[in-house]
Amino acid sequence: MIQWIEIGHLEDIPRLGARIVATDWGNIALFRTADDEIHALDDRCPHRGGPLSPGIIHGNRVTCPLHNWQIDLTDGQAVAPDEGCTHHYPVKVIETGKILLGMPVGVAV
């Protein structure tokens, strides 16, 4: 079961940029694509645990700034030939531009 938590507005995240949301479980990176889609992943590369939020966003991928791994923003999977994944969270952008993040019930943001 998830709870939807308002965490900001679309305009709070620059196109091809990211913002961090701190939670009880660790940091979550919110990425905005050139098409204004918002994706949420644990801010942790599956390779060596470095942060993904400062990475370069291209299409629906982010490139880890430490070792150039590409991570698919839609599901958190590393792009072949690399293997691994980081947790992906559901996100909604409602008509007013508010961003809602789907978190397990009981996790504080």
Image (spheres, helix red, strand yellow):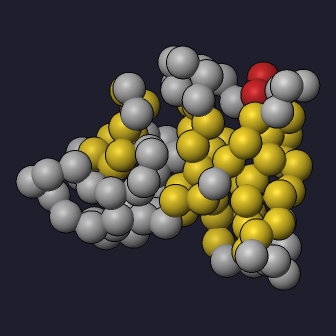
Above or below, 72 relative to 58: below
Residue under the image location 42 percent in, 65 percent down = 86
Name the residue rendered at 84%, 81% in the picture.
Answer: 106
Question: Closest to the observer: 25 or 102?
Answer: 102
Residue shown at the point (74%, 76%) measured from the top left: 1
Q: Quadrant of the C terminus?
A: bottom right
Residue at x 63% of width, y 54% of height: 90
User: Residue most toward the front?
Assistant: 1
Q: Residue 40 placed where, x, y %? A: 59, 50
Where is 68 relative to 42, above or below?
Answer: above
- The residue lying furthest to the left in this view is 81
In the picture, residue 83 is in which quadrant? Answer: bottom left
x and y percent of residue 39 in the render?
Answer: 57, 43
Direction from residue 56 to residue 8 in the image, left or right: right
Residue 12 shows in this picture: no
Furthest-bottom residue in this view: 106
- The image quarter in which residue 92 lies: top right
- Is residue 17 among the parts visible in the rendering? yes
Judge by depth and name the residue closer to the eye, 81 or 49: 81
Residue 33 in the figure: left or right of residue 80:
right
Q: Is residue 7 above or below residue 32?
A: below
